[in-house]
């Protein structure tokens, strides 16, 4: 077995060990001018996770979406995470492309199935191919009234600073409500 095969086997083993109890979930969120669909595997437990989603601005057609990986660290009722994403940008302003933002977030579990959450990701010029900077942020409160059902209310922002003569603009910006299932 060569050195690359050993490294690959160790990486797969580490992922399998840290994700032995992965929960999965999905949500749909609706804002005044946008719709967002998200899914994840392992985002609610310690260890590695993967996630993905797509958001469409229903007002002007802007959209973005992608997938990411990261690591969660649970400290009692607090879950910290750090990760990276690959995001396809389709802002309808002539600067379509990709960004590779890095960032993280926090979720604080509260009594009666409530939690508050927030996360932010950013990709400066060196991590994008079509804009100077890409930023996204999401925060709010969730409630799990029964079993796997989750209800959410929050605020989402995603925007770009244009380059090569293209102006900066918001892809989405506003409050939302949503719901989904986590297993």
Image (cartoon, rainbow, N blue to C red):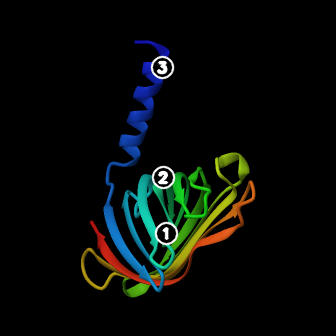
What x and y, as percent, mark residue 49?
A: 43, 53
For marks 2 and 3, give the CA distance.
Answer: 24 Å
For marks 2 and 1, give the CA distance.
Answer: 25 Å
Residue 68: give its label: 2
Q: Residue at x 40, y 60 (%)?
A: 45
Q: Residue at x 42, y 53 (%)?
A: 50
Closer-to-camera residue (7/56): 56
Closer-to-camera residue (116/63): 63
Residue occupied by mark 3: 4
Q: Quadrant of residue 81?
A: bottom right
Quarter placement of the N terminus:
top left
Name the front one of labels 2 and 1. 2
Q: Earlier in the sequence, mark 2 or mark 1?
A: 2
What x and y, as percent, mark residue 170?
A: 62, 72
Q: Quadrant of residue 131?
A: bottom right
Q: Secondary structure at mark 1?
A: loop
Q: Secondary structure at mark 3?
A: helix
Task: Answer whether residue 57 is visible to the viewer in this image.
Answer: yes
Q: Secondary structure at mark 2?
A: strand
Mark 2 vs 3: CB contact within 8 A: no
Residue occupied by mark 1: 76
Q: Residue furthest top?
A: 1
Name the front one of labels 2 and 3. 2
Q: Earlier in the sequence, mark 2 or mark 3?
A: 3
Q: Residue at x 64, y 47 (%)?
A: 129
What x and y, as percent, mark residue 183?
A: 27, 66
For marks 3 and 1, give the CA distance.
Answer: 37 Å
What x and y, as percent, mark residue 70?
A: 50, 52
Q: Residue at x 71, y 54 (%)?
A: 124
Relative vertical location of residue 81 with respect to residue 125 in this rendering, above or below: below
């Amino acid at each position: 077995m060569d050195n690359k095969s050993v490294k690959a086997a160790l990486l797969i083993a580490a992922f399998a060990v840290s994700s032995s109890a992965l929960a999965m979930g999905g949500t749909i969120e609706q804002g005044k001018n946008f719709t967002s669909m998200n899914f994840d595997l392992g985002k609610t437990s310690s260890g590695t996770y993967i996630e993905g989603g797509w958001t469409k601005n229903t007002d002007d057609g802007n959209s973005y979406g992608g997938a990411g990986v990261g690591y969660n660290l649970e400290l009692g009722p607090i879950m910290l995470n750090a990760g990276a994403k690959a995001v396809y940008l389709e802002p309808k302003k002539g600067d379509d492309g990709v960004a590779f933002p890095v960032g993280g977030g926090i979720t604080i579990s509260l009594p009666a199935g409530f939690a508050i959450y927030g996360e932010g990701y950013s990709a400066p010029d060196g991590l994008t191919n079509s804009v100077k900077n890409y930023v996204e942020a999401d925060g709010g409160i969730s409630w799990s009234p029964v079993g796997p059902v989750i209800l959410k209310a929050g605020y989402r922002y995603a925007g770009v600073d244009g380059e090569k003569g293209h102006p900066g603009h918001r892809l989405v910006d506003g409050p939302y409500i949503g719901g989904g299932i986590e297993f």
